[in-house]
Amino acid sequence: MLIKRSDRPARQTHLASFTEGQGLGRLDRRSFLRRSGLAAAGLAAVGALPLANMRKAKAGPPPEPGAAVEIRKSVCTHCAVGCTVTAEVSNGVWIGQEPSFNSPINRGSHCAKGASVRELVHSERRLKYPLKLVDGEWKRASWDEAVNAICDRITQIRGTSGADSVYWLGSAKFTNEGAYLFRKLGAFWGTNNTDHQARICHSTTVTGVANTWGYGAMTNSINDMRNAKTLLYVGSNAAEAHPVAMQHMLEGKELNNANMIVVDPRMTRTAAHATDYVRLRPGTDIPFLYGLMWHIVKNGWEDKEFIQSRVYGYDDVRKEIEKWPPDEVERVTGVPGAQVEHIARLFATEKPATLIWCMGQTQHTVGTANVRTSCILLLLTGNVGKPGTGANILRGHDNVQGATDVGLDIVTLPFYYGLKDTAWKHWSRVWEVDYEWFVSRFDNKEIMEAPGIPLTRWFDAVLLPKDQVHQKDNVRAMIVQGHASNSITRIPESLKALAKLDLLVVADPHPTTWASLALKAGRKGDTWLLPACTQFEAKGSRVASNRSLQWGEQIVKPSFEAKDDLEIMYLIAQKLGFADKMFKNIKVENNLPEAEDILREMNRGSWSTGYCGQSPERLKLHMANQKDFDLVTLRAKDGPAKGDYYGLPWPCWGKPELKHPGTALLYNTGLHVMDGGGTFRARFGVERDGVNLLASGSYSQGSEIQDGYPEFTYGVLKKLGWDHDLTPDEVATIEKIGADKADAVSWSTDLSGGIQRVAMKHGCLPYGNARARMNAFGVPDPIPVHREPIYTPRVDLVAKYPTREDEVQFRLPNIGFSVQKSAVDRGVAKQFPLILSTGRLVEFEGGGEETRSNPWLAELQQDMFIEINPGDAGERGIVDGAWVWVTGTENGSKARMRALVTERVGKGVAWMPFHFGGWFGGEDLRANYPEGADPIVLGESANTITSYGYDPATGMQEPKVTLCQITAA
């Protein structure tokens, strides 16, 4: 919480003694920034153990005069803005850090987290060697013992319960290469139960955006927001969640005298910079957005030409818009009609306008519908496909976009190919492994082509009766590599599942809350902690929010006995007996797969998404020549990468030698495809019910087809007479893939790249030229509708706006309707009258284990807290800074924390940060961590209080709206 200056001495005693013991004294932030580049300024020497076969995480003395100091570049491992970290290394020790003044993204800036990343490597609070739980105590083990025991156990479980009984939970902290390899490992094991953090942050974005216009990603870039005249934030607190991105936005705001409109239930630090602030009731984004559209249509502010030529389903959506006149919008959202009209006019008439969102919009049972409604607003006003416009979606983990793209997901193989047999056959060709072998690895072919279980419901897959889990058996083992447990809602339920699991394996630089909660659940054995190295001790590529890839060098070698994620996966594959198949085209030295070779394999198979042109060599060239890229357009004006967009943002079409520059702005018809131009993707057919789904009279610059057109196949090339532009080798590859159905081989399955190359030679997009869909047939609620949160204080609205009916989704029953009905029938809103929402702090990230273990950041936020409005606090006798109990609607959940009495939240609304863990139900669990590996700061997790609720299209959880009660402790 925000601590008064007079309170600091008493509250920082444990931290002060920690730093003073290292001869650092009381370092303020200015001192830290000044000294962080010196070898003596780390806490690296703290607790370094003189163990055999370990490299101590100890900062050495300053280099001798004349000693070599190497400069190495990597990428900040926190949010997905993509800030470059420049490291100074001497004698294998990271001795200094700069925030990379040449990077067009961070331009010499870091936030608090970025400024302190060196501590992630030097930290003495990391896991140092493998640990196993023996009679409830953590005992040291060797890597050989751990890998052998783990693989023997999961093989035994597989033999009795099937491959799906082992869940593989990966990480947005992986490099692209690590995330791809982890999904590949799941495929070779024989399961689609492979997931990562995107499930709980932007799975609804990916699904909603991709089902509107083709690809599930940010359309423009943080830099391009400098071109906007109106910026509308709905569910984004960029000032805290993405501070370096916020610098670009604020500069653009000042230079353009732009409108900055922030829509949020809470008066955030971003809202403090706004020209207009809109406070709405949590969970009512759709009514608010439709309210804007009602005024836009009523006043004729819509972009009629854009809609006529590039949009499908407008008449269908207009019927829903008409249901949201100003009085109904105000009744549901609480936003006055005059304010809605004012915002609508700004967004529709003061263009270019962009819509920015983050998890405030996505983490709902209607998350996909929220995203779809935002996209519809952009389409209605023609604010897509041009500079200063678009869906600027800010991602929360450094590689959450990349990990999603490369397929670490329950619904697809790498690069969004899906799970049908055509997708499996494509990747069988890329991997050069027989398709039938993969079929044999799964429990059956039907389950091979069925989406897996979302990570949000792993514990339900353990606990529900076997006949309600639609696979061979319940989940019995969890392999967790780089994912926090306290980031997942309904922690009391997860405790029950932790007690029941046959095996729990956690691979991470830190023990995480999996360790503390496992012991709280009563586990005595069958639990392993494996020390994974940080990404600064590895190499590989990562993707920023704007789809740009950046290559991170290995800054230093892994500390202690930590291993690279890639090595851990290789050791598992080797023990399981399929390493030779899995790595047949990837060089492996000393059990470590070569990251560059993994990226090259990805290039060979990723035609669908345009990851085919970003070779390791091209990415390294960009990192070495960052100074050449323009701040706003991100295009290199000079140098060896001249003409490229920074990081070759996907899609980067064709083979690397084709030198496609990347695509800075998606769907921009104002540019030639070979300059990064684009159209809306034709992925939903050419017509529906007699209505044309292709663009009409709209096409990218230089296109030889001056109208809409379908996606390209070998057969389409033949009809156009363009097949003669293919080389003999390309034709041979296409015909080998397609055999007697070669005409069906498409731009996304042609491993030669010839179909893409020829389409672009004629100025066309390989994926076609279609209309974006306001009516997204095929997804739940194809026309988005408002649905009240499952736990809503407005029970009077449930009859008109109920949640969806119960149904089976992702192998499990989603009983949200029954839960909502029960809550209304039992009068839960009277017992728990306060809306509870959650969000991010600038000092911490994700589940918080890394950042709360960092003394520089721990000093800034030492207590878990809940924000409560002064009116609500007064009614409950709660004073600022006092301890309170927060109780939730399910499982008798309770949590003890400090109260922050503030008008940031409105009456009837409370707010918690989601980064804390290590307490449960008022109990401090510090003793449950391995000795010396406990975070400096512990606290209750917000997800102890969060409750049931899942988006039907993705399995997204609902941490943004539930109900609670707060009482003085």
Image (spheres, rainbow, N blue to C red):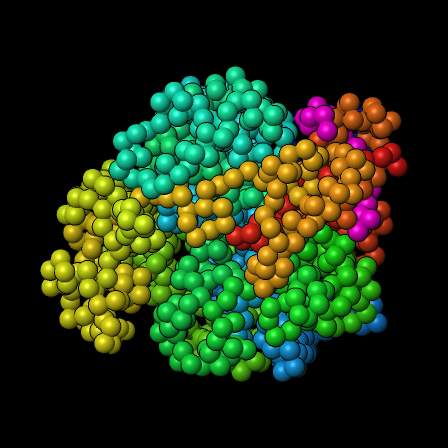
- Placement of 149 over or under 24, stated as above or below: below
Q: Is 131 left, or right, of 927 in this rendering?
A: left
- Placement of 776 over or under 374, stated as above or below: below
Residue 913 visible in image: no
Q: Nearer the viewer, residue 859 or 72?
A: 859
| Percent position of residue 583, x then y | 45, 75
Q: Nearer the viewer, residue 916 or 90?
A: 916
Query: Is residue 387 inside the magenta stretch?
Result: no
| Percent position of residue 617, x then y | 34, 58
Report the number of numbered marks. Answer: 0
Q: Is 395 left, or right, of 659 in this rendering?
A: right
Q: Quadrant of residue 728?
A: bottom left
Residue located at (40% from left, 71% from top): 421
Query: Is residue 900 inside the magenta stretch?
Result: yes
Residue located at (59% from left, 38% from top): 801
Toward the top, the furthest residue is 338
- Placement of 22 over or under 281, stated as above or below: below
| Percent position of residue 293, x then y | 44, 28
Residue located at (15% from left, 67% from top): 727
Quadrant that contains the C terminus: top right
Q: Which span is picked out in magenta?
A: 891-908
Residue located at (46% from left, 29% from top): 322
Residue 818 visible in image: yes
Q: Quadrant of residue 431?
A: bottom left
Q: Nearer the viewer, residue 146 or 474?
A: 474
| Percent position of residue 662, x then y | 31, 48
Q: Is 874 left, or right, of 277 in this rendering?
A: right
- Placement of 269 over or under 376, stated as above or below: above
Quadrant that contains the N terminus: top right
